Image: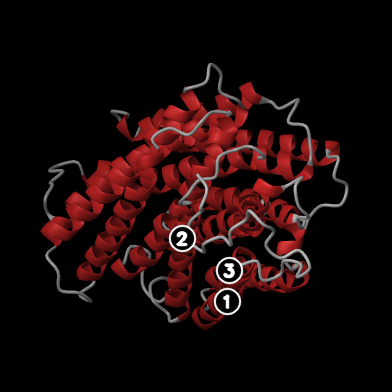
Amino acid sequence: MPGAPLSRFTMSYFAVSIACLLLALLGMTAGFGYPSDSLAAPDTLVIVHLLTIGWLGLLFCGALLQFVPVLSAAAPRLTCLSAPALILLIIGLAALLAGFLALGGRLNVDLLIIMPVGALSLAAGFVCLSLSFVWTMLSQRSVDHSGWMVLIGLISLLVTIMLGASFTGLLSGTADLGGVPALLEAGVSVHALSGLLGWMSITAAGVSYRLFSMFMVAPATGLRTRPLLASIITGLGVLWFGPFVENARSPVAASLPWASLALLACGMCVFFSDIAGMVRARRRKTLELSTLLGLCALGYLPFGFALLTWAAIAPQSETVIAAVIYVLAMGWFSGLGLSQLYKIVPFLTWLETYGPVMGHAPVPRVQDLIRDRRARLWFILYHAGVVVGLTALLADALILFRMAAGLQLVAVTMLALEFIRARRLAYAPKDIGLPSGTVRPHLFYAHQT
């Protein structure tokens, strides 16, 4: 990304997202939500939305603020919306969580006020960011492989938001679906799958193409763009419009969820094939820790699809549904997110601090701003916690699940400290220090734009 403009508030998004992850892990360690309670319980919804909106949603948005201009090779548009959008998202998430706590009898607030405020604030924040990202990408004459996937992911985000906002209206009593409870039940599944498989998986895969290509020094050529996009778009179309089939009990309607899953699985296979091609064609033969961890996180994705198939066969199994959400959220998304943060934070810090004086003064390597030996232990501990947690969910072992969440809490806390050390240049070579013309970076925002 040399020459790319630095997003001023990417670090702010990252900081809030990590705080949400730590809160969610703290809650799981304390036995808050599933499996101590049911999957649809208000306490569980608090944990789920802390992870999906607070941790992953803000993480993805913060990363896109920096990478969308890179993906499109264009100047970022509507950058003035990034800070207000973050404030709206924080307010919206806080209001939504307060509403869930009120539903569970843990907080005394007016649902008629707090839930609509949460829905509107979240919708406004995500729409503002989506407008900025879409305008930036479409400002160029052509959109590349990764860009199309991000655009599809953003459409999935808007569908997820729309459905989520309608559910908050129902929960608060401000809206009434009347005689279509079946549509509501289907809508919950579409809301979850559109978020997990549409917005998060497709966006993560799209950005991964560019990140892996960049950090492995691998040519992004020979990618199977058409079959990948065709599988994704068709699969999501079936997912979104399947519930509106008039005769929900017809053989065609019954086969639609399987068709959607099969199409998205085909897209996943193409994605894995493309990444494998990049690994074989890479010029950097020794992979960095962040890249190895990112590739390892990909292993959770097919396992998540296998569990999703199991859940479709046994739709009454709450345990399997919880395992699907867990392995995708904590394994695939969080594993990939944490691994790439370990590279992105020092990389952006290096660009901000030493980029302006490169060629005019001695500068360290990006790798000099981190310590792999320390971080490796915490990544191993995190993934051990994910594997133990998944096993505990499937075995219905509550105490073991809480212990696994505790392991992940310790690991993420220590990784967050490593990110802070990288940001504060704690590991930077003392003999280089801060050359003339550089400024020590702020923890939560970039001095340069």
Please name the residue that numbered disc 2 is placed on.
17
Q: Secondary structure at mark 1?
A: helix
Residue 253's x, y, as percent? 39, 32
Nearer the observer, disc 3 or disc 2?
Answer: 3
Please name the residue that numbered disc 3 is placed on.
420
Residue 183's x, y, as percent? 26, 41
Query: Which amino acid lies under the numbered mark 3 shown in the image of this protein?
Result: Ile
Q: Secondary structure at mark 2?
A: helix
Could you tell me if the residues under marks 1 and 3 are in contact, i.e. CB atoms within 8 Å?
Answer: no
Query: Which amino acid lies under the numbered mark 1 shown in the image of this protein?
Result: Ala
Which of 242 and 65 lies nearest the eye of the viewer? Answer: 65
Give the alpha-carbon distance from disc 3 to disc 2, as whole Å: 14 Å
Please name the residue that numbered disc 1 is placed on.
404
Label placed on residue 69:
none
Q: How is the image coloured?
A: secondary structure
Q: Secondary structure at mark 3?
A: helix
> Crowding at label 2, few (<14), some or many (≥20) Cα neighbours within 10 Å?
many
Query: Which amino acid lies under the numbered mark 2 shown in the image of this protein?
Result: Ser
Give the alpha-carbon distance from disc 1 to disc 3, as whole Å: 24 Å
Vertical placement of residue 120 versus 270, above or below: below
Which of 141 and 448 lies nearest the eye of the viewer? Answer: 448
Give the alpha-carbon distance from disc 1 to disc 2, as whole Å: 21 Å
For the point 63% across and 38% down, the residue is: 268
Residue 171's x, y, as percent? 19, 56
Q: Quadrant where the N terminus lies?
A: top right
Q: Earlier in the sequence, mark 1 or mark 2?
A: 2
Looking at this view, name the residue that lies furthest to the top.
Answer: 141
